[in-house]
Amino acid sequence: MSLDSFNHKKDEEMRESYETTLKDNKKDAVAFLKNISRKEVERKRSVTFSITESQLKKMDTAARKSGFKNRSEFLASIIDAI
């Protein structure tokens, strides 16, 4: 898709659409940032426990699908939900 097509009317419509989208996203970002507050950070502690290899693979897969950085973050989120 190119803005330099032979149809100038469509090019102008696309430019306007892009500009509107960018302006809306900036407004949304400002509103989003206003709602963020720093929460108290709790000290983390390492723990050791045993799970099977298949359970570990399931946890890795679920963490990736859910957008977590790693399985520890995913597991912490599950525990917080309890």
Image (spheres, rainbow, N blue to C red):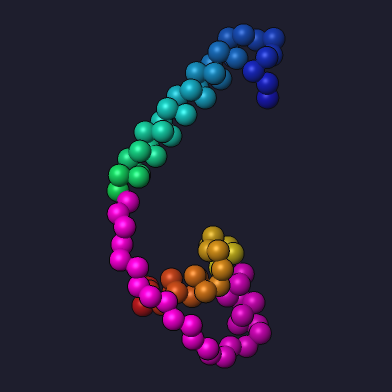
Picture coordinates of residue 30, whole percent (x, y): 35, 38
Residue at x-position 60% and y-position 14%: 11
The correct choice, above or below, for 39 with respect to 79 in the image is above
The correct choice, above or below, for 65 with respect to 15 in the image is below
Q: Say which quarter of the image contains residue 43.
A: bottom left
Is most of the magenta stretch helix, strand or loop? Answer: loop
In the picture, the quarter occupied by the N terminus is top right
Picture coordinates of residue 51, whole percent (x, y): 58, 88
Picture coordinates of residue 81, whole percent (x, y): 37, 73
Residue at x-position 35% and y-position 45%: 33
- Magenta run includes residue 23: no
Residue at x-position 52% and y-position 24%: 18
The correct choice, above or below, for 13 with respect to 32 in the image is above
- Magenta run includes residue 52: yes
Question: In screen coordinates, is 78 left or right of 50?
Answer: left
Picture coordinates of residue 44, whole percent (x, y): 42, 77
Residue at x-position 61% and y-position 72%: 60
Q: Which of 35 and 60 is in front in this view?
A: 35
In the picture, the quarter occupied by the C terminus is bottom left
Furthest residue toward bottom: 50
Q: What stretch is highlighted in magenta?
A: 36-62
Q: How many labels does the image show?
A: 0
Question: In screen coordinates, is 25 left or right of 13?
Answer: left
